[in-house]
Amino acid sequence: MVKTYTHINEKIKNGDVVVVTAEDMIKIVEENGPKIAAEEIDVVTTGTFGPMCSSGAFLNFGHSDPPIKFEHLWLNEVHAYHGNAAADCYIGVTRMADKRPFEYGGGNVIEDLVSGKKIRLRGISNTTDCYPLGEMDTSFTIDDLNQAILCNPRNAYQRYVCAVNSTDKTLYTYMGKLLPHFGNAHYAGAGCLNPLSNDPNYETIGIGTRIFLGGGIGYVIGEGTQHNPSNGYGTLFVKGDLKQMNSEYLRGVNFEKYGTSMFVGLGIPIPVLNDNLAKKTAIKDEEIITDVVDYGIPRRDRPILKKVTYKELKSGLIDLNGNKVKCSSLSSLYYARKIANELKSWIEEGLFYLNPPAETLSRNTIYRSMKQTSELKFVKDLKRDAIICYDDCNLKMVAQKIIKENMNHIIITNRERVLKGIVTSFDVTKAIAEDKTDINEIITKKVITTTDNEPIEVAARKMKVNDISALPVIDENMKVIGILTSEELM
């Protein structure tokens, strides 16, 4: 059986269109098969609601009198990008406020804007003959703008990895707070409700596809950045009128010690044009597979620990090395369902029609990583030999080594050189002042470490964040193979 967009839109107009959500379609196909489902169902609605960091908005303020061509401008103290025409700007959701980093950013500005709140605009200019005004400090609401266009270069990931942390310290990432020693797992995406999971070959999703976006109507305008369809990580480039949207489906979010972003509600109707699409829109969570990735290793090709299904992810626990790890989603399944159902209502009420894409999206786009032409230095390039004392030595021996080797840091190991702790010259001085003699009273046992193949920049950040001046270099067996100090970095 083959249907057409014209046929489906006619049924929408007449009020007899049959629409179900992607979750409902699973049961329908199970009970009746894809052929009968294709005959009975006209449209399947999808939905997703999660952090979309590659989001932002173009705003047009109109010209002031006298006019100004902004060189820099801030919206609620969030630096916006001006390099467009004189009265336009683009504000990205991950840009943080100058005075409140990690607490407020571009995503919060957009939420406040669609909520009808006043936004402060402060700007400066390199004056010209036609744009003589040098400064501007004013406020506006969304109704004062000529255009407010949500423009998101990368949205609606087909699926996303599940993030865990193998290290001995908490990591603060765009995947949320990851606890040490695989203490938790975070994933994103709505699984069987995800738009691109229901049309993985982009038969109905392409340039010009009308979508639910932020509570209003939007459009797909192309493939998203980092579009990687061959590996099941397709993305969409979307836009829509912010004036139609609302803050229920556009929420600013602030990730602890990482930065800001915005939750974006997005839903796409999939017209059931044939039996194959009926089958694809009945995809189950157990059929959608993603990778569990160790974010404790700070490099592009983080190791994949295992494959996991969205059914297992949604259960709240994943099995990792024989241990049950608590798993939670950064996306909201509640809102994904709400979006799919709201889009369903729009279609049934004749408020939303389907349109065929002017051009389908690429299925063979090649995803490339950044080309790096400058030489990258690693810890192994700068480390030095560590001065070691065994864990049964006394304080006097540590002090003698500090003097003899002219070294501020003494690494404490067992006889097999397995790391046990670290002692500094300050620790020894403090111990003497307090009449302490036992090395175990002054040793720092929770030690921040590095490895040979860690980039120098990553090791330097560890020192800065933890306010320390040295990192023991260890191998995969926790054996000490060197030390990296602030002196080597300088």
Image: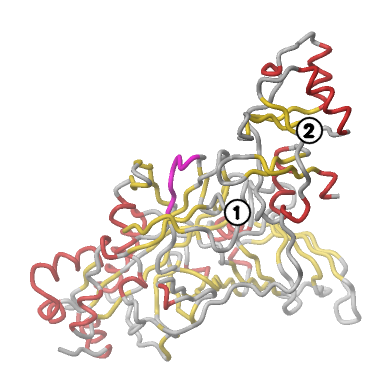
Q: Of the numbered discs in the image, which one, if any, rests on residue 260?
A: 1
100 on left or right of 161: right
Is there any visible trace of residue 244 in the rendered image? yes
Q: Which residues are magenta?
A: 181-187
Q: Is 186 covered by the magenta stretch?
A: yes
Residue that appears at 84% across and 34% down: 407
| Above or below 166: residue 21 | below
Is there any visible trace of residue 77 in the rendered image? no
Front in this rendered view, residue 459 or 350:
459
At which x and y percent is residue 3? 20, 89
Residue that appears at 37% across and 69% down: 267
199 on left or right of 177: left
Front in this rendered view, residue 484 or 104:
484
Tags 2 and 1 in contact by the CB under 8 Å rule?
no
Front in this rendered view, residue 457 or 379:
379
Front in this rendered view, residue 490 or 127:
490
> Mark 2, residues whose alpha carbon is within 10 Å: few (<14), some, or many (≥20)?
many
Q: Is 481 covered by the magenta stretch?
A: no
| Above or below 275: residue 240 | above
Q: Looking at the picture, which amino acid does disc 2 mark?
A: His
Q: Quadrant of the N terminus?
A: bottom left
| Above or below 43: residue 376 | above
What residue is disc 2 on?
409
> Mark 1, residues whose alpha carbon is within 10 Å: few (<14), some, or many (≥20)?
many
- Name the image quarter holding residue 406: top right
Q: Looking at the picture, which amino acid does disc 1 mark?
A: Thr
- What colour scheme governs how the chains and residues are painted in the rendered image of this protein? secondary structure
Q: Earlier in the sequence, mark 2 or mark 1?
A: 1
Where disc 1 sits, the SS reads strand
At which x and y percent is residue 80? 70, 64
**Nearer the camera: disc 2 or disc 1:** 2
